[in-house]
């Protein structure tokens, strides 16, 4: 039988941008908010979050949600001692990094029936089966295999980000970071030319666009354009920049040379 979230207490470990977004969701369900971070978030505090020590958060929270990066200081942040402080019917949600939780200690707690549910986007160490179809193979990671035998555990392969919108935002953010890191970033003002929007070249035949790890080439080119350097990425047999503004024969609009059957698959600038 399930439980209502309204009136329950959620402990948010890490109240950065993602933790703040999660806090807004929890606040919408009418939950009591506890937080722990090195620096308080004024938005979260405005929603009624009470910042407490980490040990107090583990003791009082009905739901513990992790939103901190994996650093030497945060590895196994939720260890056997922290799990021992949590309520017997607490729920642990790790949507950050698998290394934040001591997986072996979590298995021991679940085996003892002291944690009502656990959800994680990965485990540590991260098995190679997360990135391949191993549905017909034997799971060689004993800890992962044991963890997935529990009916109250959900483990995913850290792939919630893999949507068209999210990947587009990742590329745009990467371009902005490269541009801001340029030596003359402090000298530029808001009058600098904005980074053009990104779109993908459509393969022939109406097939779905393909993703290529070499899209960083276009990121470099666009970053150079935005900084006024006018530099272009190194030319290659599969990546050449047209001299003109229009699309060349057998090339995409950004000048990337098309593959066979017109499958470019790389990033190009949206038509103006």
Image (cartoon, rainbow, N blue to C red):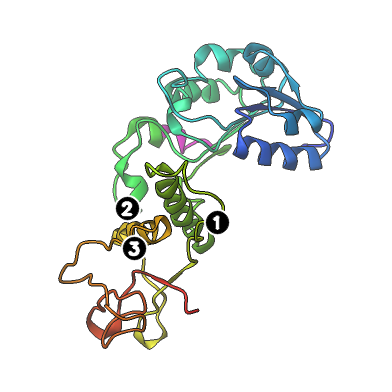
Instruction: From the top left corner, tell me how far across and down residue 63 is, in percent.
Output: 68, 29
Q: What secondary structure is marked by label 2?
A: loop
Query: Which contiguous range is marked in magenta?
Result: 146-150
Identify the mark at residue 132; answer none if there is no mark: 2
- Is 195 left, or right, of 84 in this rendering? left
Instruction: From the top left corner, tell me how far across and down residue 136 is, in percent.
Output: 32, 54
Measured Cα–Cα span from mark 2 to mark 1: 46 Å
Tell me if mark 3 has few (under 14), some (14-19) or many (20+) residues whose alpha carbon lies within 10 angstroms of its own. Answer: many
Which residue carries the number 1 mark?
191
Classify residue 113 by image quadrant. Answer: top right
Q: Can residue 2 be seen in the rendering of this structure?
A: no
Which residue carries the number 3 mark?
218
Instruction: From the top left corner, tell me how far across and down residue 250 is, in percent.
Output: 26, 86
Residue at (42, 49) in percent of width and height: 179
Residue at (80, 31) in percent of width and height: 46
Instruction: From the top left corner, tell me how far across and down residue 162 is, in percent.
Output: 47, 56
């Amino acid at each position: 039988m399930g439980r209502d979230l309204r009136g329950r207490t959620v402990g948010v470990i890490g109240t950065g941008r993602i933790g703040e977004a999660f806090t807004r969701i929890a606040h919408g369900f009418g939950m009591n908010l506890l937080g722990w971070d090195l620096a308080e978030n004024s938005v979260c505090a405005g929603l009624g979050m009470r910042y407490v020590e980490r040990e107090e958060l583990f003791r009082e929270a009905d739901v513990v949600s992790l939103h901190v990066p994996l650093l030497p200081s945060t590895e196994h942040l939720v260890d056997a001692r922290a799990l021992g402080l949590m309520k017997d019917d607490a729920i642990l949600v790790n949507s950050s990094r698998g290394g934040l939780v001591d997986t072996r200690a979590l298995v021991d707690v679940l085996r003892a029936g002291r944690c009502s549910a656990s959800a994680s986007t990965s485990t540590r160490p991260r098995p190679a089966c997360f990135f391949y179809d191993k549905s017909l193979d034997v799971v060689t990671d004993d800890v992962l295999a044991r963890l997935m035998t529990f009916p109250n555990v959900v483990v995913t392969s850290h792939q919630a980000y893999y949507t068209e919108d999210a990947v587009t935002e990742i590329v745009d953010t990467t371009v902005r970071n490269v541009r801001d890191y340029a030596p003359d970033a402090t000298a530029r003002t808001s009058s600098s030319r904005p980074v053009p929007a990104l779109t993908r070249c459509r393969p022939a035949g109406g097939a779905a666009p393909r993703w290529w790890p070499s899209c960083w080439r276009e990121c470099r080119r666009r970053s150079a354009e935005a900084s006024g350097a006018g530099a272009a990425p190194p030319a290659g047999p599969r990546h050449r920049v047209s001299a003109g503004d229009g699309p060349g024969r057998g090339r995409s609009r950004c000048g990337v040379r098309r593959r066979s059957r017109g499958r470019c698959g790389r990033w190009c600038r949206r038509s103006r």
